[in-house]
Amino acid sequence: MDTRHDCAPPCCPAAPAPDPTPCEGPHDAATIIDPHGREVAGCVHHCARVLAGLEGARVHPFASAGSAMEIYLRARELPPCAWEIGK
């Protein structure tokens, strides 16, 4: 799961490379686990965007309930690669 990129200010590790949107909140609000077991921590905003685009991904069970719920609710409303259509 290669998600690092150059944006200013520095984005969280979960921010997909082509996604120009800024982080929202702490860069370690939650951790996303992809279907292969790889993990990446990130802000709620970018974790939701990653979750929306990775079939079989999930929020790490040790994330706070509030962050996990917010990520799942946001991801439900997003298409994969939301930045490509301006979301």
Image: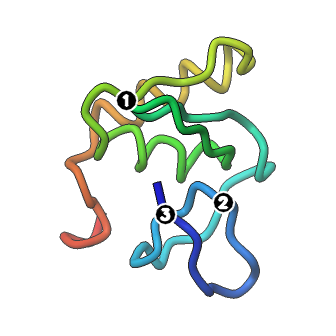
Q: Where is residue 1 in the image (x, y as percent from the top left)?
A: 46, 54
Residue located at (77% from left, 52% from top): 27
Q: Where is residue 48 in the image (x, y as percent from the top left)?
A: 46, 41
Q: What mark, if any, has residue 13 been given in the picture?
A: 2
Q: Where is residue 81 in the image (x, y as percent from the top left)?
A: 26, 60
Relative to 87, 16 lies left or right: right
Q: Is mark 2 on a helix, strand or loop?
A: loop
Amino acid carrying label 2: it is Pro
Residue extending furthest toward the front: 36
Kindly identify which residue carries mark 1. 35
Q: In which quarter of the image is the C terminus?
A: bottom left
Q: Distance between the residues labelled 3 and 1?
A: 14 Å
Indicate whether 7 appears above or below 62: below
- How many neighbours does mark 2 have within 10 angstroms: few (below 14), some (14-19), or many (20 or more)? many
Q: What mark, if any, has residue 50 been given in the picture?
A: none
Q: Distance between the residues labelled 2 and 3?
A: 9 Å
Residue located at (69% from left, 61% from top): 12
Kindly identify which residue carries mark 3. 2
